Image (cartoon, rainbow, N blue to C red):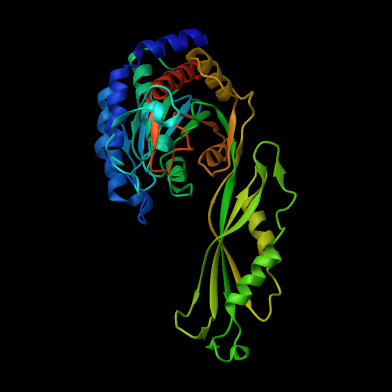
Amino acid sequence: MDVREAFRIGDEQVDDAELDALFIELLRVPSEHTERMESDPAVTAFVADVVAPRLEALTGVAPRIDGMGNLLWQLGGTASHPADGVLFMGYAMTYPASSMPEPFSGKVVPGEHYGLDGPCVWGRGGCEQKAALAAMLASVAAVTRSGRELARPLSLAVSTAGETGRHDAARYMLEQDGLAARYGIVGLGTTNRVCLGNKGRIDVDVVVRGKSCHSSTPWAGVNAVDGARAVLERLDGLVDGIAHPELGAASLAATHIESGPDILHTIQDHCRLTLDRRLLPGEEPGEALAAISRALTDMEPWQVEVTQGNFMYPADVPASSAVAVALEEARAQAGEVGPAIYFPAALDAGYLNEKGIETVMFGPGDLAFAHTDAEVVPLGQVRRAARVYAAAALQLLA
């Protein structure tokens, strides 16, 4: 389908007043990240009690909720093309409200106060997850209302993740639910630019063990805190020279440290560190872990244990890929400008690409405002995103 025709259909079928109200409604329902992660009742209720009924009302097609609380919806397609369609993946979970005032008000504020054009909506999660989610919901409604018969499926998945730093929800949908597609678009705040790639990440737990004694005679023990310092010195320069032309350098950073026993005047017998190793496209999590383990051998008088925590794959999609081209052509019709971008954060696009779904990221919202006390998104950006999503899907499914 010609991009101009696809965009015309999306433009005609997206109802701006309906979309604005939907976006505001999503922001007014808290679905924050907590220690319960994807199983948090507020997150699962947001998906099942807010998103699911709104989506069915918009499209006339009932979604289903899987065993992890994720939402899955599909339009069109035949049994002969189960994995040849387009997948939109949105997110339910947001960063905690923290110190943000009126985080769930969904109030409309003037954009000029924040260097933005036109009216904006205020609310936690708007810049990362919920503006893109609202636009995706409006876009699948637009495709449904167009009456176009789709030979290949358009799927929408709403993940219970969003802030967890792991692929668990996406993995569940692909492995347990059988979710499949040829092309994917992850809905996150990219200021309506196409994001072609991102860094991955592996969390590494390092435990340094020594021997306790009274701190008045430190030579009688083996101080695990000194061992932790030796670990960090061993790791200095481990990733030097590893770089990507768009994503920059790989990195290795200590993000947490604790020691024990938690008693006064006592040399510590163990120290636990958490390392954040950012992965570049082409790097494997297992190889990165092995390099850290090798660097920390022969650490006498300390014993050092290295174990892998959560990890997320990196992504790097060519600008010439079909999904990127479809989005760029639709962006041009919407009057959006600006080159493709890359994210240093770890995201689900890496996992989807690893599983053979050609996936990029796109959505309204500027991550510069995310996690701040003034999280705002221009309504015009959300409206244009809905049209771009719809036009890109129609092109890819033609």
Note whether 385 is above or below 166 in the view shown: above
Identified at 59% across, 88% down, the residue is 218
Residue 194 coordinates in the image, percent (x, y): 55, 27
Residue 136 coordinates in the image, percent (x, y): 39, 27
Identified at 63% across, 89% down, the residue is 219
Nearer the observer, 16 or 351: 16
Judged left or right of residue 174, residue 49 is left
Nearer the observer, 34 or 146: 34
Nearer the observer, 337 or 200: 337
Residue 13 coordinates in the image, percent (x, y): 35, 13
Identified at 51% across, 11% down, the residue is 3
Which quadrant of the view contains residue 234? Answer: bottom right
Question: Can I make out residue 59 in this image?
Answer: no
Note whether 116 is above or below 259 in the view shown: above
Residue 6 coordinates in the image, percent (x, y): 46, 12
Q: How many marks?
A: 0
